[in-house]
């Protein structure tokens, strides 16, 4: 391999220029760097909203690289085949990338690295998607953490390197390989008419993510401990969509949070804990990858959950038509914006798995199709936490009451009014956007009567407790 041969920089969920260890290392060599994004087998497997949002991130990264005198080469096909073709076309001697940790990505990357190394290629992966490598945090006995609080205590005071700057220069090759047009991939096609609606609620790209972080630290973090629980208030960072696409690094968020904490903003610690919750999810996925598809606790395998996603009660849940305002508001928020308030996620997860006795995988799959901030680790851990089948889970008999929860955390009714148009004389644009985004065959209109509960809070709770008691006998 010639020492001045180009480096293929394989981008995936790291759509940024700052604090990008793989890009920083490649640029520092002085060798030509050819950034490439492959619409490969893992991308093909994404749900509608995650693929749509990733496409927006790819477009923003393409433009950002162009502003630095570089390019983003776009190709489609099986990852290994595409990379080998590009190596042959460009004379590159290396393929570098940022590590991912979910089972699908690990399987792909392990196979790619082995094959390229066998070809004599410098195949190298770098950190960057997490603060701590999942295998680097261990209990006193050398095992992995199964409960969040001890994990938080273990990592809270660990050193986290300062974010890396944007490279001053990204050397270009003498001749760029051909690239396809991003629009030809139609990455938002599965969204159908919802794409135009959901796009209005996204803040895409590295610059937008940094502004979002700066605004949060300046205006919201001081009251984050309280405001984060109020779904009708814009009190969270909103950075989940940017983190999942890698438009901002967790290190940038971590250091911003620590700086606020050191200035005396006590609630910044709650923000840091949320960043570590994401780390904990990946820690679990690395050590127990079955968490993404099967009950983490195998004793739940025999529990009689409904698995029919087309059951009428489940369809009412997916459509935000359960007749339970907190559940419906949260489900509609997700369909319109691609995200859902965290308390809403707990409520809809509890309602589906306990009041409707439906398997958490049904909810996990629906979220994987509808969330623009979909994250394979956080989605899996969150659903198993809600169901009671996962690590650090809420006990099965802890059944959230979505009526009292709404009274407690949305006492003025802002959240319900924002997302449920029925019954309002002049509903807001957010509530009306839901009718513009949903499939036409749902045959819904804002002047229809709001539905009666498909399962009342009382009936659902009793049914869940009866099922839990039967499981114990």
Image (cartoon, grey):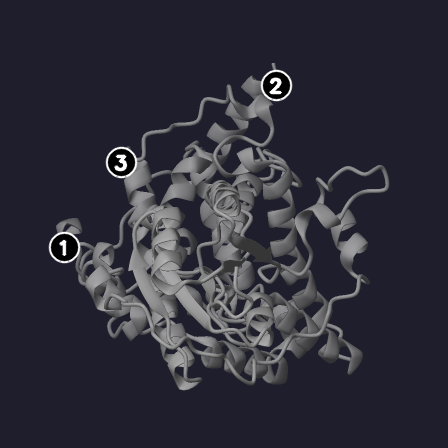
Report how far apart the C-alphas of labels 1 and 2 lie in the structure: 44 Å
Residue 450 pos. (x, y %): 26, 54
The residue under the point 59% across, 22% down is 299
User: Looking at the image, is mark 1 or mark 3 earlier in the sequence?
Assistant: 3
Residue 4 pos. (x, y %): 52, 70
The residue under the point 28% across, 33% down is 311
* Residue 355 vertical position relative to residue 229 in the rendered view, above or below: above
Tag of residue 472: 2
Q: Is residue 398 visible?
A: yes
Q: Disc 1 vs disc 3: Cβ atoms closer than 8 Å?
A: no
Q: Nearer the viewer, residue 76 or 15?
A: 76
Q: Residues within 10 Å of mark 2 (few under 14, many from 20)?
A: few
Residue 143 located left or right of residue 408: right
Residue position for label 3: 312
Residue position for label 1: 440
Q: Quadrant of residue 291?
A: top right
Label 1: which secondary element: helix
User: Looking at the image, is mark 3 or mark 2 earlier in the sequence?
Assistant: 3
Label 3: which secondary element: helix
Report how far apart the C-alphas of labels 1 and 3 lie in the structure: 18 Å
């Amino acid at each position: 391999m010639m020492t001045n041969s180009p480096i293929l920089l394989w981008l995936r969920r790291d759509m940024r220029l700052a604090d990008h260890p793989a890009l920083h290392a490649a640029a520092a060599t002085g060798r030509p760097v050819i950034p490439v994004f492959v619409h490969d087998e893992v991308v093909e497997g994404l749900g509608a909203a995650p693929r749509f949002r990733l496409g927006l991130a790819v477009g923003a990264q393409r433009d950002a690289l162009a502003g630095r005198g570089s390019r983003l080469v776009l190709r489609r096909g099986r990852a290994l085949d595409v990379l080998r073709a590009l190596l042959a076309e460009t004379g590159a001697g290396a393929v570098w990338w940022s590590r991912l940790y979910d089972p699908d990505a690990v399987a792909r990357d392990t196979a790619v690295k082995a094959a390229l190394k066998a070809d004599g290629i410098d195949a190298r992966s770098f950190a960057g998607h997490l603060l701590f490598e999942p295998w680097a945090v261990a209990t006193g006995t050398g095992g992995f953490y199964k409960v969040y609080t001890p994990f938080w205590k273990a990592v809270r005071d660990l050193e986290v390197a300062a974010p890396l700057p944007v490279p001053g220069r990204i050397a270009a090759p003498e001749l760029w390989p051909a690239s396809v047009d991003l629009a030809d991939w139609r990455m938002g096609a599965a969204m159908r008419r919802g794409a135009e609606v959901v796009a209005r609620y996204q803040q895409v790209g590295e610059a937008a993510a940094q502004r979002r972080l700066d605004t949060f630290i300046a205006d919201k973090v001081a009251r984050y401990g309280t405001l984060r629980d109020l779904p009708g208030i814009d009190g969270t960072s909103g950075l989940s969509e940017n983190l999942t696409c890698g438009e901002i690094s967790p290190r940038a968020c971590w250091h911003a949070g620590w700086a606020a904490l050191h200035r005396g903003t006590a609630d910044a610690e709650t923000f840091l804990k949320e960043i570590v919750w994401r780390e904990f999810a990946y820690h679990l996925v690395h050590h127990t990858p079955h968490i993404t598809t099967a009950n983490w606790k195998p004793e739940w395998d025999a529990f009689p959950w409904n698995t029919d996603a087309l059951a009428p009660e489940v369809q009412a849940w997916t459509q935000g038509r359960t007749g339970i305002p907190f559940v419906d508001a949260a489900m509609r928020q997700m369909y319109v914006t691609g995200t859902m308030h965290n308390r809403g996620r707990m409520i809809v997860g509890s309602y589906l798995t306990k009041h409707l006795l439906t398997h958490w995988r049904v909810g996990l799959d629906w979220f994987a199709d509808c969330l623009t901030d979909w994250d394979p680790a956080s989605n899996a851990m969150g659903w198993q936490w809600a169901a009671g089948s996962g690590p650090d889970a809420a006990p099965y008999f802890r059944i959230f009451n979505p009526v009292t929860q709404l009274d407690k955390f949305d006492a003025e009714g802002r959240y319900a009014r924002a997302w449920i148009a029925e019954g309002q004389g002049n509903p807001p644009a957010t509530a009306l956007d839901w009718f513009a985004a949903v499939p036409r065959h749902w045959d819904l209109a804002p002047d229809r009567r709001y539905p009666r509960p498909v399962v009342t809070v009382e009936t659902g709770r009793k049914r869940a407790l009866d099922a839990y008691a039967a499981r114990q006998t």
